[in-house]
Image (cartoon, rainbow, N blue to C red):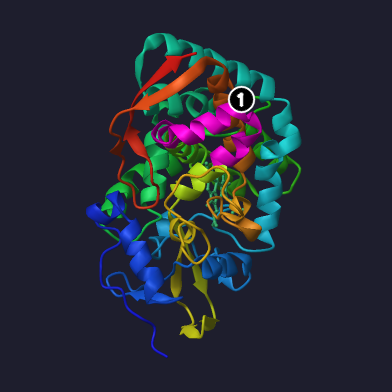
Amino acid sequence: MNIPQYDQDIFSDAAILDPYDHYRAMRDLGPLVYLPLYDIYAVSRYADVKKVLLAHNVFRSGHGVAGFTWPEAFSVETTLTSDEPTHSRFRQIIGAPLAVPALAQLTTDIEASADALVARLVNLGQFDGMSDFAHFLPVTIVSSLVGLPEQGREKMLEWAGAAFDVLGVDNDRARNAFALVGEMIEYVKTQCNPDTVKPGGWAAQIWTAMQEGRITPQEAGTLHVDILAPALDTTIFATGHLLCQLATNPGEWDQLKADPSLIPAAIDEAIRLESPIRTFARVVDEAQEIGGLTLPAGARVLVLYASANRDERRWDDPERYWIQRPGLQGHLGFGQGRHICAGMHLAKLEMRSLLKSMLRRVDRIEVGTPELQPNNILRGFKSLPARFVPV
Ligand code: HEM
């Protein structure tokens, strides 16, 4: 059977602003589609996305998870872009401070910061849901926990956005971002070392692992990218979506107010509906069968989390924000299997802390029209006019 072809550009400006009709069309075409514009394949149905993610030994990350082969100068091996056994070795180091027991020690501080922020915004009246609200915890608390040298830190947000743009396909948006990614790699190589990072911070723990002989000096350098790039925008965008969904679905907000035990579901449902990471890719060394179609050896395949999370074959009424949604735990917004997000407990802790405070202090949330921040991989807002109506 021939693999169906989808001729549209799913990375055009218009498609990035509104990708969901494209994803539906791809799902309807078949379990595997070919995108001739980029000479790449894609899986877009829930069942196939999950299957690919779980088969990490076959659908590999070690050739990079971008939709194209990167220029050699930028090809660094990180937790995200490695296969076993290297991946597990890296993940133990990166994952330790992000695991639930380590985060438990931070909960009081994060909740206090979140509460102070919400109290301030309630008094402020009108605010920006992104720069004033969603940015706050990642940019203050998380940046400090990472403990990178001060110099250059202010560029972290810009670098993080660029680091995701280059994980898309070979288009102008990716090519224009390479200069910034080069700056980020240069910063890591020249500014981050055991003497410049904050003692006790996450970056310092990477250097400790090197001193213990668990990773090489070169690996210690590149592992900083794992905590630099994904820690900010992902959570910021998820927080923006959460705010927007709760404001535009007042019935769901009322349910949450009546039953705060629904907080984790409110967060997961926002990430399912508006997955902050739309896609990453995998590469197969040998031909693989997907839904009766053959993916050729050496092919690169986009794994569309954002499409799987709206697949009508898996979800009832997939475009609705519904916090009591049956089966919500199975969403793929944090990935699945070996490469499942290493920072998801931190992201959830940040969002949970904000919601806990909002439930106490906010009666109603109002939002205006959001402006999207275009990115090859990420989905999130640049700005979101908002107001908290106090209790
Ligand atoms: C709501 C916020 C977030 C979302 C939606 C998200 C999403 C994802 C997804 C979909 C993956 C899977 C990659 C794959 O399949 O190849 C991933 C991996 C990863 N994420 Fe997150 N992420 C978030 C927050 C964070 C934070 C806060 C951090 C760090 C502090 C982080 C660090 C990582 C790392 C290191 C990996 C690679 C894991 C591996 O390959 O084993 N993420 N994330």
Quadrant in which residue 199 is drawn:
top right
Quadrant in which residue 356 is drawn:
top right
* Image location (x, y in percent) of residue 282: 50, 67
Farthest residue, direction bottom: 1
The residue under the point 35% across, 57% down is: 20
| Amino acid type assigned to the residue bearing label 1 in the image | Lys
Instruction: Name the main secondary structure of what is drawn in magenta.
Output: helix
Q: Is residue 162 above or below residue 200?
A: below
The residue under the point 38% across, 88% down is: 2
| Residue 324 visible from this viewpoint | yes
In magenta, the rendered stretch is 243-267
* Image location (x, y in percent) of residue 290: 52, 79
In the rendered image, residue 344 lying in the magenta stretch gets the answer: no
The residue under the point 76% across, 35% down is: 101
Q: Is residue 189 above or below residue 143?
A: below
**Residue 93 or 13: which is nearer the viewer?**
13
**Residue 140 or 356: which is nearer the viewer?**
356
**Residue 161 or 221: which is nearer the viewer?**
161
| Residue 196 visible from this viewpoint | no
Q: Is residue 32 above or below residue 179?
A: below
* Image location (x, y in percent) of residue 61: 54, 63
**Residue 296 or 111: which is nearer the viewer?**
111
Q: Residues within 10 Å of mark 1 (few under 14, many from 20)?
A: many
The residue under the point 44% across, 55% down is: 306
Element type at mark 1: loop
Give the labeled residue for mark 1. Answer: 198
As drawn, is 180 to the left or to the right of 114?
A: left
* Image location (x, y in percent) of residue 50: 57, 65
